[in-house]
Image (tube, rainbow, N blue to C red):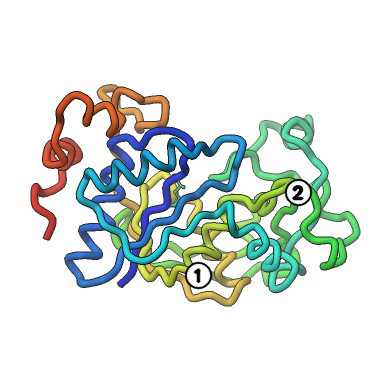
């Protein structure tokens, strides 16, 4: 088995990240598998070299070792663009809507309140009927997933080992209704879903261990894997670490950052205890 940790260098790692990284790392090591690291720095306006360095420092301090080179998404723009131009070219359309346009169209009087999916407002389809863009012109500014060239009855599924005890299954028509035409490319860089799927494949990931907040997004990844001809890995969406009020930790919870705990003299064993993991990794 081969798993990974894929943080974004947009702030300090907190207890939730530590749990995710330790769980994936421990699982790989216990099974004699490998554990790799990927830096999800697609959005260069938010990524910072100092946050990236802190990721390496925090992980090393936690006792986490990773195999092989670190993959940095900011260096792979051409690879993502090639996938859009190639296997995905019949399944994308150029979208000229900004956030406000999407909001306005989705909330048009006849449509009632905008519907939300795992990726925000479900795209109302404004640009879906525009003439197709020639592959050589892909990617243009923004590209979205086109669903109308797929059999609406096609059923896809993935094997989930943590979050539910059944195999989540969905059809293309359910995907269209509940998730819709998600963004795959934004102006100059690939969107998370596209890059994540391509990189999980490129890094040979067999098991994806990540937070339950991404459970709904996995349908997007499974559909993209289908379109790209990739096998679907096994998924474990683990419980989330919350604050005192039961809210999921986010980057703003600086007080729960690993850096802050380190500065207060906590040990890696203390962090394991705080997130409910066994003291010694096996
Ligand atoms: N970069 C994502 C995050 O920091 C993780 C994505 C994933 O594990 O697929 O939340």
User: Image quadrant of residue 184?
Assistant: bottom right
Task: Report, in whole angstroms, how far the alpha carbon at label 2 lies from the one at label 1.
Answer: 24 Å
Please tell me which residue lies in front, 130 or 166: 130
Which residue is found at the position 31% from the left and 42% from the top?
A: 57
Say which of 262 and 211 sits in front.
Answer: 262
Residue furthest left as drawn:
279
Quadrant of the frame with the N terminus? bottom left
Residue 248 image point, x, y percent: 35, 33
Q: Can you say whether 68 is above or below 51 in the image?
A: below
Does 270 sit left or right of 72 as displayed? left
Tell me where residue 208 appears, x and y as whole percent.
Answer: 38, 61
- Please name whichever residue, 186 or 70, is drawn nearer the observer in this view of the structure: 70
Q: Reading the chain from its start, which is encountered first: label 2 or label 1? A: 2
For residue 48, side relative to residue 269 (left or right) = right
Q: Residue at x 67, y 35 (%)?
A: 114
The relative height of residue 128 versus residue 99 in the rendered view (above or below) is below
Q: Which mark is residue 121?
A: none
Which corner quadrant holds the C terminus?
Answer: bottom left
Q: Which mark is residue 202?
A: 1
Q: Which residue is mark 2?
A: 142
Any atom of ligand 1 within 8 Å of the CB at mark 2? Answer: no
């Amino acid at each position: 088995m081969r798993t990974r940790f894929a943080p974004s260098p947009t702030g300090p790692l907190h207890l939730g990240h530590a749990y995710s990284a330790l769980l994936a790392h421990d699982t790989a090591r216990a099974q004699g598998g490998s554990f790799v690291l990927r830096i999800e720095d697609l959005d260069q306006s938010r990524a910072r070299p100092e946050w990236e360095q802190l990721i390496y420092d925090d992980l090393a301090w936690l006792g986490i070792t990773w195999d092989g080179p670190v993959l940095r998404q900011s260096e792979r723009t051409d690879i993502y663009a090639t996938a859009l131009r190639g296997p995905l070219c019949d399944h994308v359309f150029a979208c000229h809507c900004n956030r406000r346009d999407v909001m306005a169209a989705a909330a048009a009087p006849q449509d009632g309140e905008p519907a939300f999916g795992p990726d925000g407002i479900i795209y109302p389809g404004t640009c879906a009927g525009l003439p197709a863009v020639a592959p050589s012109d892909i990617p243009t500014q923004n590209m979205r997933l086109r669903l109308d060239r797929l059999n609406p009855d096609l059923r896809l599924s993935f094997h989930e080992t943590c979050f539910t005890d059944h195999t989540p299954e969905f059809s293309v028509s359910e995907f269209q209704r509940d998730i819709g035409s998600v963004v795959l490319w934004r102006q100059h860089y690939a969107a998370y879903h596209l890059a994540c799927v391509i990189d999980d494949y490129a890094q040979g990931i067999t098991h994806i261990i990540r937070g339950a907040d991404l459970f709904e997004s996995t349908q997007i990844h499974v559909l993209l894997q289908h379109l790209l001809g990739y096998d679907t890995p096994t998924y474990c969406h683990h419980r989330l670490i919350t604050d005192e009020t039961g809210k999921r930790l986010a980057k703003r919870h600086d007080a729960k950052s690993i850096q802050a705990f380190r500065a207060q003299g906590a040990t890696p064993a203390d962090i394991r205890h705080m997130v409910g993991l066994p003291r010694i990794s096996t």
